[in-house]
Amino acid sequence: MTDTPKGSPQEQAATLMQALPHMLRYDDAIIVVKYGGHAMGSEEVARSFARDMVLLEQSGVNPVVVHGGGPQIGAMLKKLGIKSEFAAGLRITDRETVEVVEMVLAGSINKQIVGFINAEGGRAIGLCGKDGNMVLARKVTDSEVDLGFVGEPDKVDATVLDQVLGRELIPVLAPVAMGADGETYNVNADTFAGAIAGALKAKRLLFLTDVPGVLDKNKQLIKELKVDDIRRLIADGTITGGMIPKVETCIYALEQGVEGVVILDGQTPHAVLVELLTDHGAGTLITR
């Protein structure tokens, strides 16, 4: 038996045959994608990501994009001569800084992603947590230092998203929210995505990161984990550093009602499509 020539009609047909059962599984499902940090990368990577979101929407999936923008915020603060400090991995956000955060997240980055999706034939709509009172934030108070206007999701009202989803529109959400005190809060994008995915009872929440997923002690990818496995791997030192808050957010999202959460490398071409539409997936799937 000869190998199927690469790129031939037979190979393309085989790819579609493999993808079809997965497309049926995710038909009309809500998939929340947290896109940010190194995964945003170059313009080429951003355009590729936009094409993937459009393809998902056109194949019957309802993608919701939540983006971060820490490097871009840092660059703008530096440009404006505003000193920025961190505590426990979170940016200390005074009133001057939160204005820049909102400008960058809900402004330039949000509209750039919307523009890329629209340029690829989709119809994206840019929103933030303030729109329609989508996310009400509360001030983070469990840090050893006062983080200023750093918040965490308190309540999510999905009314606006319910109006958008299923209408061939792709919501692109910036993690900026209003507090009950009327102040604007900078919300961690991972936590924001978890809260949104939970409120929408999403079938999948995908965290696009700069690592392949959760690795074992031999630095090999762990394909699937249950919540109990995660707690054990944290206890024995397999999961360390920045991956701990990431998997804790995954557990939070599952507790909110998300069916499954995946950590995967956003710099891998078409990582989202490989994860959702192939047998082997692309990262670490975490379920209850």
Image: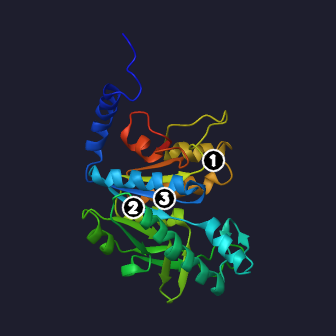
How far is the residue under mark 2 from the one under mark 3?
20 Å
Q: Mark 3 or 1, which is nearer the eye?
A: 3
Colour theme: rainbow
Q: What type is the residue that disc 3 sits on?
A: Lys
Please name the residue that numbered disc 2 is placed on: 119
Location of residue 107 with respect to 221 vertically, above or below: below
Which label was assigned to residue 234? 1
- Label 1: few (<14), some (14–19) or many (≥20) C-alpha neighbours in 10 Å: some
How far is the residue under mark 2 from the one under mark 1?
42 Å
Mark 2 or 3, nearer chain start: 3
**For the point 29% across and 64% down, which residue is it?**
165
Q: Mark 2 or 3, which is nearer the eye?
A: 2
Location of residue 203 with respect to 154 vertically, above or below: above
Please name the residue that numbered disc 3 is placed on: 34
Percent coordinates x, y for residue 90 in the rendering: 65, 69
* Visible residue check, residue 271: yes
- Label 2: few (<14), some (14–19) or many (≥20) C-alpha neighbours in 10 Å: some
Which element carries disc 2, helix, strand or loop?
helix
**For the point 64% across and 65% down, which residue is it?**
71
Mark 3 or 1, nearer chain start: 3
Q: What type is the residue that disc 2 sits on?
A: Ala
Left or right position of 288 against 233: left
How far is the residue under mark 3 from the one under mark 1?
23 Å
